[in-house]
Amino acid sequence: MRFMIIVKASPDSEAGVMPSEELMTAMGNFNEELAKAGILIDCDGLQPSSKGARVRFSGDERTVIDGPFAETKELIAGYWLWQVKSKEEAIEWVKRCPNPMPGTEAEIEIRQVYEAEDFGAEFTPQLREQEERVRAQAKKH
């Protein structure tokens, strides 16, 4: 099972305040533990929403909205992608994580990633082949 582990933004992360050396060391050590355990697929931090944009879809119309975005607690400051046996295992790993936003309340969300078998018959053999080609091509970059 794959899970995306989502670190929620804080006023500091949205203001572009960089983590301390102490926090970067603690997170680096945690990431190393995840890698050694064989569960880490990917991880990264995200720049503040002031450097981002959203595209709103309404029928065929597209509207671009430049950041920053108001609801800090709903924004993402970083993520991990993990391969674990269960949601419970992901929870146990998150509980071991250093507080990503020291000095304030922080929240990390755990969301399971869809797998091919979750889509049922609508995910035809042709669509599965296409998905495999796309993933193989993406890995080349």
Image (tube, rainbow, N blue to C red):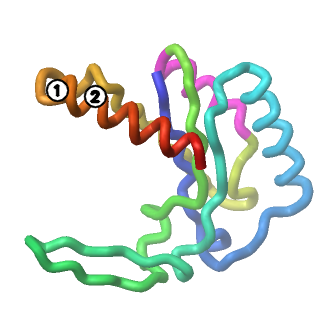
Front residue of 61 and 70: 61
- The quadrant holding residue 118 is top left
Disc 2 is placed on an element classified as: helix
Disc 1 is placed on an element classified as: loop
Relative image position of residue 27 (x, y in whole percent): 79, 45
Kindly identify which residue carries mark 1.
Answer: 124
Q: Is residue 59 left or right of residue 41?
A: left
The amino acid on which the numbered mark 1 sits, given as a three-letter code, is Thr
Q: Residue at x 35, y 83 (%)?
A: 65
Residue 86, numbered circle: none
Q: Tell me, yes or no, whether the two marked residues, 2 and 1, touch with CB atoms within 8 Å.
A: yes
The amino acid on which the numbered mark 2 sits, given as a three-letter code, is Arg
Q: Would you call the spot at circle 2 few (<14 residues within 10 Å), some (14-19), or many (20 or more)?
A: few
Residue lying at the far top in this picture: please name it: 85
Q: Is residue 106 left or right of residue 127?
A: right
Relative image position of residue 109 (x, y in whole percent): 49, 43
Q: CA distance from mark 2 to mark 1?
A: 6 Å
Q: Residue at x 75, y 42 (%)?
A: 98
Q: Is residue 20 left or right of residue 99?
A: right
Q: Residue at x 21, y 23 (%)?
A: 125
Q: Would you call the spot at circle 1 few (<14 residues within 10 Å), some (14-19), or many (20 or more)?
A: few
Kindly identify which residue carries mark 2.
Answer: 128
* Magenta segment: 86-97
Relative image position of residue 84 (x, y in whole percent): 55, 20
Q: Is residue 52 above or below residue 43?
A: below
Q: Is residue 109 magenta?
A: no
Q: Is residue 88 magenta?
A: yes
Q: Residue at x 70, y 52 (%)?
A: 100
Q: Is residue 123 left or right of residue 96?
A: left
